[in-house]
Image (cartoon, rainbow, N blue to C red):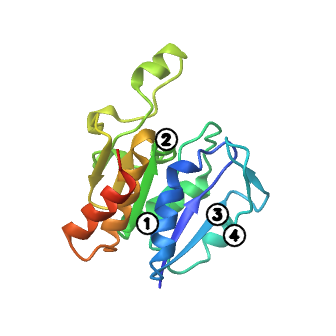
Amino acid sequence: MKRIMFFIYDEMVDYEFSLAADLLGYSNEFEVFTASYNKSPVKSKAGIVYQPTYDLDEVMEIENIDGIVITGGWKRTKDERLTALLEKLNKEEKLIAAICAGPEFLTDTNILKSHNYTSSLPHEEYVKNKEEDPFPREKFINEAVVRDRNLITAKGEAFIDFAIEIADWLNLFENFDKKEEVRKTFKIY
């Protein structure tokens, strides 16, 4: 069984990863679990409280993690343990998926320097707030979803396509028609 970690933190946007978790959880091929910096409850921007399954110290002891999904949110505090995990997963060519502001967690790694990516955080927002832009913009692509080898990134409004790309990367669909059938199921309008 493949193990996929969903990284959670205070003021995260939980709807951005809920469909991905649902698709993987229903498949019976994946163990989906949550992890955070510690085991304290995490409160999403919507006000829902989540209890992390593991803290990052425990995650570092898990021998086989097949991927990580990181949602966007407001309190994006970086931690060297998460950076180390991301670098390890990238070296092993495991799934790294980040949506909306989630790719900012990747800026302390070399992942965004070697992969095309997107994000909901434009360069202009950092300039307006008089902050240094942490993103290597030469690999930025202004698309809803960008998939480059083991990295899948998306803008927040593309959470359905983000979930479908994650499921596709993990070979959840038998063929392209099945992938499109799922897309049509969730994108009715």
Number of disc labels: 4
Q: What residue type is labelled 3?
A: Ala
Q: Which amino acid does label 2 sit on?
A: Glu
Q: Is mark 1 on a helix, strand or loop?
A: helix
* Residue lying farthest to the bottom in this orientation: 1
C-alpha separation, residue under disc 1 versus residue under disc 3 = 15 Å
> Which residue lies at the image location 73% right of the left edge and 53% below the top edge?
42
Q: What residue type is labelled 4?
A: Thr
Q: Is residue 53 above or below residue 138?
A: below
Q: Which of marks 1 and 3 is nearer the N terminus?
A: 3
Residue topped by disc 3 = 35
Q: Residue 89: which numbered mark, if any? A: 1
C-alpha separation, residue under disc 4 versus residue under disc 3 = 6 Å
Residue topped by disc 2 = 104
Q: Residue 53: which numbered mark, if any? A: 4
Q: Earlier in the sequence, mark 1 or mark 4?
A: 4
Q: In this view, does 90 lie above or below 144?
A: below
| The C terminus: image quadrant | top left
> Which residue lies at the image location 42% right of the left edge and 59% below the top edge?
96
Q: What residue type is labelled 1?
A: Leu
Q: Which of marks 2 and 4 is nearer the N terminus?
A: 4
* Residue lying farthest to the right in this orientation: 40
C-alpha separation, residue under disc 1 versus residue under disc 4 = 19 Å
> Which residue lies at the image location 43% right of the left edge and 39% below the top edge?
157
- Which of discs 1 and 4 lies nearer the camera? The answer is 4
Q: Residue 107: which numbered mark, if any? A: none
- Which of discs 2 and 4 lies nearer the camera? The answer is 4
Residue 152 in percent (x, y) is at 35, 54
Residue 1 in percent (x, y) is at 47, 85
